[in-house]
Image: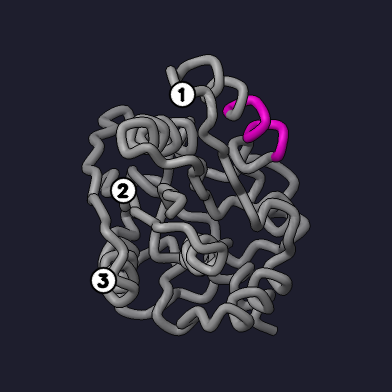
Amino acid sequence: MKKAIILLSGGLDSTTTLYYALSKSYKCSALIFDYNQRHRKEIRHAVAIAKELKVHYHIIKINLPWKGSSLLDKQMKVPTKRSVKKMSAGIPSTYVSARNTIFLSFALSYAEVEGAEAIFIGANAIDYSGYPDCRPSYFRAFQKAAYEGTKVRAIKIIAPLIKLSKAEIVKLAKKLNVPIDRTWSCYLGDKKPCGVCDSCQLRAKGLE
């Protein structure tokens, strides 16, 4: 059976990506990252989803003491009540520097050791918050790095949601029977979703 490594955060996009990979007959293993994010609640959702699907997972703890993001530094304010137009106008404070590069590097190492032929990531470039590491050009560049930097030279970086809107992602999630209500997207990580951060608003827009 073909193997894949999934970057699983517990959010709508990454969970849909996991279900998508399973639907394509991949034997999946998940990487769940604890990087001291303020919305660490997502980790519990990711673990619960992996356990329910009987997907093997690792929780990788990373320390980023330099912070530089409102997801890491509670002294910084998470943007709220922004229009979708404003979200795509620039890079918000929730951007964690080189996060996808860090995550994908761990996944690449894991994939090579495990003999996995693919790494799946739930990034998307249409309804996104201006992150530079969510662009198609970024993934094309990382694919080249993966080819040049591994002995197997055959691990594919797959971002199946990259060109989908949030509405299209929701439709795909429903088609795949993703338990949307058990995913977590809010940046604040309180008992209930705040409903006003960028992630909550994009999720609500997609569901609507």
Q: Does residue 81 belong to the magenta stretch?
A: no
Alpha carbon of mark 1 to alpha carbon of mark 3: how far? 30 Å
Q: Nearer the viewer, residue 112 or 74?
A: 112
Mark 2 lies on residue: 33
Regarding residue 141, the answer to whether it shows in the image is yes
Disc 1 target residue = 152
Q: Which residues are magenta?
A: 136-142
Q: How many marks?
A: 3
Earlier in the chain: of badge 2 and badge 1, it is 2
Q: Measure the alpha-carbon separation of dots 2 and 1.
A: 25 Å
**Image quarter of residue 135:** top right
**Which mark is first along the chain, 3 or 1?**
3
Amino acid carrying label 2: it is Phe
Decide: few, some or many residues near mark 3? Use Cα within 10 Å; few <14, some 14-19, many ≥20: few
In the displayed structure, would residue 157 be above or below residue 206? Answer: above
Q: Which residue shows up at 56% across the image and 39% down it?
A: 157
Which of 108/126 is in front? 108
- State the residue in front, 96 or 48: 48
In the picture, measured across the screen, residue 1 lies left or right of residue 166, that is left
Q: Nearer the viewer, mark 2 or mark 3?
A: 3
Please name the residue that numbered disc 3 is placed on: 51
In this view, the residue farthest toward the right is 85
Q: Amino acid at mark 1?
A: Val
Q: Percent x, y for residue 185?
A: 46, 67
- Secondary-structure class at tag 3: helix
The alpha-carbon separation of the residues under discs 2 and 3 comes to 16 Å
